[in-house]
Image (tube, grey):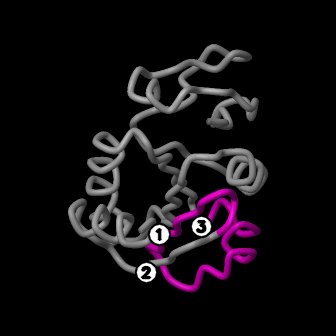
Amino acid sequence: MLLVCPHCGTRNRVPEDRLAEHPSCGSCGREVAPHKPVALTDASLAPYLEGTEAPVLVDFWAAWCGPCRAYAPQYEQLAASRPELRFVKVDSDAAPAASQGLHIRSIPTTLLFVGGREVARQSGAMSAAQLSAWVDQALA
């Protein structure tokens, strides 16, 4: 499976059965499949989505948003328990081009990408269990 390093942008081939083993990037040596959400920007989001074969969840949020802050621990909890998924956070204030390009109208908004294409979208905060069920339904 190809994964884009969230730190340097290098594409890495990682066997699916090794995702839980914290593989490192062949270029920068940092963890390529962290079990926590990684922050991406306007510049790094599109290449990450296009180059990563694993399903990617993207949480659009902002620091001033109360529901976003309440949702963050639930999102992180699911990231720790689902190594087959990639988890990304995008600050909608710091990444206006990504927010505009993906038509983000409210936050928090969670998008699910498979093969670089959006397959599902959900606005509003969810519990980790609700988020997991939503992902499973979207991937079915």
Work out which quarter of the rendered image holds the N terminus and state it: top right
Q: Give the spatial CA distance, label 3 vs label 2.
A: 14 Å
Amino acid under disc 1: Thr
22 vs 85: above or below: above
Q: Residue 127's x, y, as percent?
A: 23, 66
Amino acid under disc 2: Ser
Q: Give the spatial CA distance, label 3 vs label 1.
A: 12 Å
Mark 3 or 1, nearer chain start: 3
128 vs 22: above or below: below
Q: Quadrant of residue 95?
A: bottom right
Near mark 2 (Cα within 10 A), the count class, few <14, some 14-19 or many ≥20, is some
Near mark 3 (Cα within 10 A), the count class, few <14, some 14-19 or many ≥20, is many
- The residue range painted magenta reads 92-117
Which mark is nearer the camera, 3 or 2?
Answer: 2
The residue that disc 2 covers is 123
Q: Residue 72's x, y, as percent?
A: 34, 57
44 vs 110: above or below: above
Residue at the spot 28% in from the left edge and 42% down from the top edge: 81
Residue at the spot 28% in from the left edge and 67% down from the top edge: 133
**Pointers 2 and 1 in contact (C-beta within 8 Å):** yes
The residue that disc 1 covers is 110
| 37 falls in the magenta region | no
Task: Point out the residue furthest to the bottom here.
Answer: 105
Amino acid under disc 3: Ser
